[in-house]
Image (spheres, coloured by chain):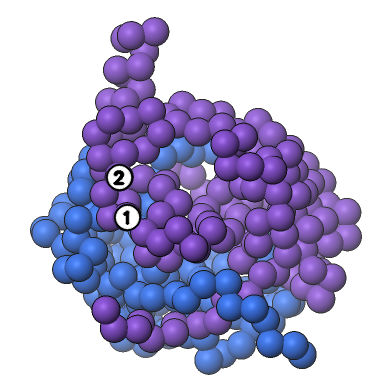
Chain colours: A blue, B purple
Amino acid sequence: MTIPELLFRPRAIGVARTPFKETAHVPKGPGTKHEANGTLEILPEFEAGLTDIEGFSHLFVLWVFDPSEGFELLGAPPGEEVPHGVFATRSPFRPNPIALTVVELLRRDRSSLHVHGVDMLDGTPILDIKPYMSSVPAEALRRGWLEEAERRRASTA
Amino acid sequence: MTIPELLFRPRAIGVARTPFKETAHVPKGPGTKHEANGTLEILPEFEAGLTDIEGFSHLFVLWVFDPSEGFELLGAPPGEEVPHGVFATRSPFRPNPIALTVVELLRRDRSSLHVHGVDMLDGTPILDIKPYMSSVPAEALRRGWLEEAERRRASTA
């Protein structure tokens, strides 16, 4: 394997404070609702970057999966027996260990964002926060293997 | 400034082929619809990771902004006079130069994904692709300064 070019140097803009001290505590699998509250503690040096963020109800949070695990191009998500490609799942074992979570912004307190819907471990490094600006209308969305998995689950419940 | 810890080593999983050869060609500003088609050419070594992606109508694409530009914590988006925090905008001048675009998947041809809605330059390195699994209902979404900017624009149109 050749060493890939370093595209940029990722840095933490802050850390997430969540109720999850271990991976096993994070709710997983199709249909999981993330209902936990947490705090995104942004480093004071980046606080100016949060200006006007209060106006947005939802945010994208980009954060880092534990990169020591390596990646797996095919794998079965929790609760699934059929393996799917990593780019068709939210698997943490990705070529670039970047995670994406949509959270609801409850309030801002200086450089801390209190949010609803966290699914990352306590202490997770945060890479970026972006405003959630538009949605794909529900009627235009197809969700592949996930829809089938939910149907299977419903029919055996 | 201290050198930040290297959280992980970003690598390109492929490149985007788009009609945009220069930044000035990419449509920008509030209310912009991204209607261009393009191709995400994933490296053959990662093709297995695309297994079952055809079932999804929409994808998140994570890609890299030109990192040579540095970052700016406060800046006015195109068409705006008021500066906003970088984390409340889609500005390319971010502490981590990671971009996020939602595209519609038209079809897959081996390791090439033909998509609608690209807004990145031709040749842009791609970091990750994730399935778009759920939307925030339109009635639950608040979009801060962007809504105000759109109202201003509509009232002067």
Residue B110 horizontal side relative to residue A119, left or right: right
Specify whether B17 is left or right of B67.
Answer: right
Q: Which mark is residue B72?
A: 1
Q: Chain of mark 2?
A: B
| Element on which disc 2 rests | strand
Q: Are marks 1 and 2 in contact (CB under 8 Å)?
A: yes
Numbered-mark total: 2
Name the foreground residue: B24 vs A51. B24
The amino acid marked with disc number 1 is Glu
- Horizontal side of B117 relative to A112 (left or right) equals right
Q: Is residue B1 visible?
A: yes
At label 2, which amino acid type do we have?
Answer: Gly
Q: Secondary structure at mark 1?
A: loop
* Front in this rendered view, residue A40 or A83: A40
Residue, x 26% and y 43% (percent of image)?
Answer: B84
Q: Against B108, is A136 above or below?
A: above
Q: Which disc number belongs to residue A61?
A: none
In percent of width and height, residue B3 lies at 35, 83
Q: Image check: A82 left or right of A136?
A: right
User: Where's the C terminus of chain A, which quadrant?
Assistant: bottom right
Q: Identify the disc placed on residue B75.
A: 2
Between residues A38 and A78, which one lies in front from this camera angle?
A38
Whole-percent x, y for residue B7 in the image: 44, 83
Q: Residue A16 location, x and y as percent?
A: 29, 73
